[in-house]
Image (spheres, helix red, strand yellow):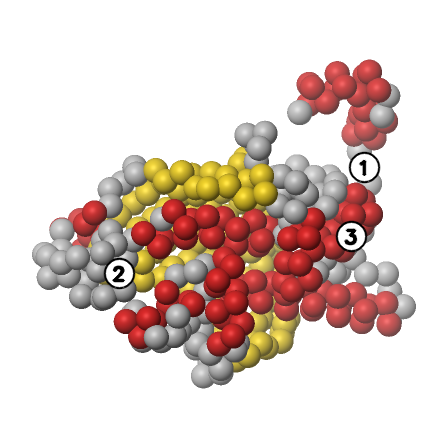
Amino acid sequence: MNPITASRRHFEDLSVGEITTLGSTTVTKEMIVTFAREFDPFPFHLDEEAAKKSLLGGLASSGWQTAALTLRMLGDRFLNTIASMGGLGFSELKWKKPVMVGDTISGTATISALRRSRSHPERGIVTIDIAIGNQRGEPVMTMRLANLIELRDPSAPMPLEAAE
Amino acid sequence: MTRWFEDITLDEAFPLGSHTFTEAEIIRFAQMYDPQYFHIDPEAAKHSQFGGLVASGWHTVSIGHRHMVDALFAEEARLRGLGKEPGVSGPSPGVNRMDFKAPVRPGDTITYTLVVTGKRPSNSIPGWGLLFNTLEATNQRGELVYHAELVGFSKLRDYKMPLRLRVLMALTRLPVLGKVLANRTG
């Protein structure tokens, strides 16, 4: 048993359809510029005048920053409450609307699938659908994450459908 | 890319450079965005499947993005040096797939490469084209760290706005009519 994750929820404790309400984050100009300087130094993430002339129409966070802030909200309410073994990746990440200075983002994480790993039957894979919106209720970003999770009982027989 | 949509050749590999990850920066990124024990605590991380501290996949990806942006600026400078007018790249609408293949540990050097695998004019934003890019990151042993399928925007050099659209845009500048049209087309 992993002492770090022993008291957390394991694969067997999760169910498809479970929804976690994420916290919220208000994005400041300083946050946008600090992140952009390190990871996404396009003028439309650094400079208000350049941003006004761009497709974004004003100073907006890097899409990667929106994703990273979402990940933090997911960690606080979900990933650090389960026996997470790390992420496998993500798909269908869509930036639907820019996050502008002063916007507050929040959202939900819904478990859309649960299955045992084919290559490592002692591990489970949880699929999490994320939907993030702003304070006006407009969709900002959606994505689907795949994350590994420990089984409480790794010796449990593999269900037939998971072995396919 | 900072080339005009028309000038972008498919399946050409663009080397984006390398980055060596230190333990301190791995922990600093993870404390802000991904504070799971195997990203922030070297002792606790020994109990994880990784057997030690590893970078958040989102950290590796963010550094990869930084390298892509730097490469775009370098390409822009190169084109200007040749006396050519560089193209314009726009914000990305999203990522189709991102697969984390191998962990990144302190001291690992990750090398990033971008390939444009497809392109087409945008249906929703006139004058811009969509680029379908593959970004791959490998470590110093040549192992694939992640594989990404990204979407980007690039401006068309030779775009001529259709007359119907030009009239519509001129009309939206009139205050009252503009409001009506915005409501109808939005």
Q: Is residue B124 visible?
A: yes
Kindly identify the residue that appears in the image at 43 percent across and 68 percent down.
Answer: B40
Residue A5, image x, y percentages: 26, 61
Amino acid type of the residue tagged 1 in the rendering: Met
Neighbours of disc 3 within 10 Å: few (<14), some (14-19), many (20+): some
- Residue holding disc 1: B161
The chain letter for the residue carrying disc 3 is A
Residue A8, image x, y percentages: 25, 54
Of B163 and B52, nearer the camera is B52
Amino acid type of the residue tagged 2 in the rendering: Thr
Of A24 and B94, nearer the camera is A24
Task: Classify A43 as above or below B100.
Answer: above
Kindly identify the residue that appears in the image at 79 percent across and 43 percent down.
Answer: A52
Q: Mark 2 or mark 1: which is in front? A: 2
- Residue holding disc 3: A47
The chain letter for the residue carrying disc 2 is A
Give the structural element (helix, strand or loop) at label 1: loop
Kindly identify the residue that appears in the image at 56 percent across and 49 percent down.
Answer: A66
Quadrant in the picture for residue A83? bottom left
- Residue holding disc 2: A5
Give the structural element (helix, strand or loop) at label 2: loop
Quadrant in the picture for residue A124? bottom left
Q: Are marks 2 and 3 on the same chain?
A: yes
Q: Is residue B42 left or right of residue B115?
A: left
